[in-house]
């Protein structure tokens, strides 16, 4: 469903700030894989997400989505295959627009837009049903401006919008990191449900090792722009944070260093 073949990216090449952020990275996700991604500071997690989205040209390698080589496809064309939720609850939704208007934009993604795109009663009912599944009471606030919602409500709405058109790959980029623990757990629970119900293929970057172990069917750990651990199935189910830290030092030859990961 998603394949990264020998992907490399260096920022600020040939300058004093040169940084090889991805180094011959290979990753293949099967349909329905839900992969959690962890790694220390600057390991290349966000850069990998940006490479999938086509934020800039790769130095080397290929990106394939659903068997199609999208390496040279610009980000706005690639977006048709992807759903992405960022860490910042302010991104992904339009604050000055109503909940139903935001949903209508997501609903019309990829369709030719006409001058008049009034929301029909049937459509509004669909949105209500969808919002009900979040169990946050948003089904009664269709006309509320999104800017009035809490961070957690906004992330849940963004998640709904990102998956409304069933993307080939869903990218969750530390999407619960800015939320308090209780709200983060709720948004993770919603993410699990949406991914399972729609059999989505997903990549979730998290700095929380416990969450990386508890969610998804596969876990990868990055270091120096490469994947150094890839754990799945039964082995993943039995993992503990101590195992992960031990395996990291064996695979990388150093101690795991992520201020946020170790604090959570
Ligand atoms: N646009 C850019 N320009 C220059 N350097 C960049 C750019 N994007 C990322 N980098 C550098 O590439 C390396 C990998 O960064 P990346 O953001 O992918 O790490 P990360 O694993 O997401 O780390 P963190 O958990 O700290 O956010 C870092 O050294 C970072 O400073």
Image (spheres, rainbow, N blue to C red):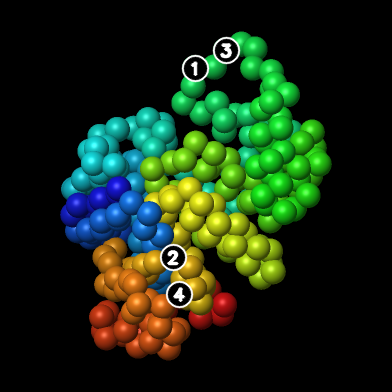
Q: At 72% across and 54% down in the image, what residue appears? A: 135
Q: Quadrant of the C terminus?
A: bottom right
Q: Secondary structure at mark 2?
A: loop
Q: Which residue is mark 3?
A: 114
Of callouts 4 and 3, the N-terminal one: 3
Classed neighbour count for the residue bearing mark 3: other residues with Cα under 10 Å, few (<14), some (14–19), many (≥20): few
Q: Which residue is mark 2?
A: 216
Q: Which residue is mark 4?
A: 213
Classed neighbour count for the residue bearing mark 2: other residues with Cα under 10 Å, few (<14), some (14–19), many (≥20): many
Q: Is residue 76 above or below residue 262?
A: above
CB within 8 Å, label 3 to label 1: yes
Tell me if I can see residue 96 in this picture. Answer: no
Q: At 67% across and 36% down in the image, what residue appears? A: 127
Of callouts 1 and 4, the N-terminal one: 1
Q: Which residue is mark 1?
A: 112
Q: Position of residue 215 (x, y in %)?
A: 48, 68
Classed neighbour count for the residue bearing mark 1: other residues with Cα under 10 Å, few (<14), some (14–19), many (≥20): few
Residue situated in front as seen by the camera: 233 or 79:
233
How far apart are the two marked residues, 4 and 3, measured between alpha carbons? 45 Å
Q: Is residue 161 above or below residue 2?
A: above
Q: Position of residue 42 (x, y in %)?
A: 39, 65
Q: Secondary structure at mark 1?
A: loop
Q: At 69% across and 26% down in the image, what residue appears? A: 122
């Amino acid at each position: 469903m998603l394949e990264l073949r020998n992907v490399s990216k260096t920022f600020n090449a040939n300058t004093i700030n040169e940084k090889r952020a991805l180094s011959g990275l290979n990753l293949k996700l099967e349909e329905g894989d839900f992969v959690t991604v962890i790694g220390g500071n600057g390991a290349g997690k966000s850069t990998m997400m940006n490479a999938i989205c086509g934020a800039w040209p790769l130095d080397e390698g290929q990106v394939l989505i659903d068997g199609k080589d999208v390496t040279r496809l610009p980000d706005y064309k690639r977006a048709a295959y992807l759903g992405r939720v960022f860490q910042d609850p302010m991104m992904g939704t339009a604050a000055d627009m109503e909940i139903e208007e935001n949903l209508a934009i997501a609903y019309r993604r990829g369709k030719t837009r006409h001058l008049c795109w009034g929301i029909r009663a049937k459509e509004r009912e669909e949105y209500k049903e969808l919002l009900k599944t979040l169990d946050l009471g948003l089904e009664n606030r269709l006309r509320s401006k999104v800017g009035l919602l809490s961070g957690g409500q906004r992330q849940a709405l963004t998640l709904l919008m990102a998956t409304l058109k069933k993307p080939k790959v869903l990218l969750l980029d530390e999407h619960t990191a800015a939320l308090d623990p209780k709200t983060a757990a709720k948004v993770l629970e919603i993410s699990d449900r949406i991914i399972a119900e729609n059999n989505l293929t997903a990549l979730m970057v998290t700095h929380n090792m416990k969450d990386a172990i508890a969610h998804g069917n596969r876990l990868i750990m990055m270091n120096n722009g490469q994947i150094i651990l890839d754990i799945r199935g039964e082995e993943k189910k039995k993992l503990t944070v101590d195992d992960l830290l031990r395996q990291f030092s064996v695979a990388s030859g150093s101690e795991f260093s992520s201020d946020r990961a170790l604090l959570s």
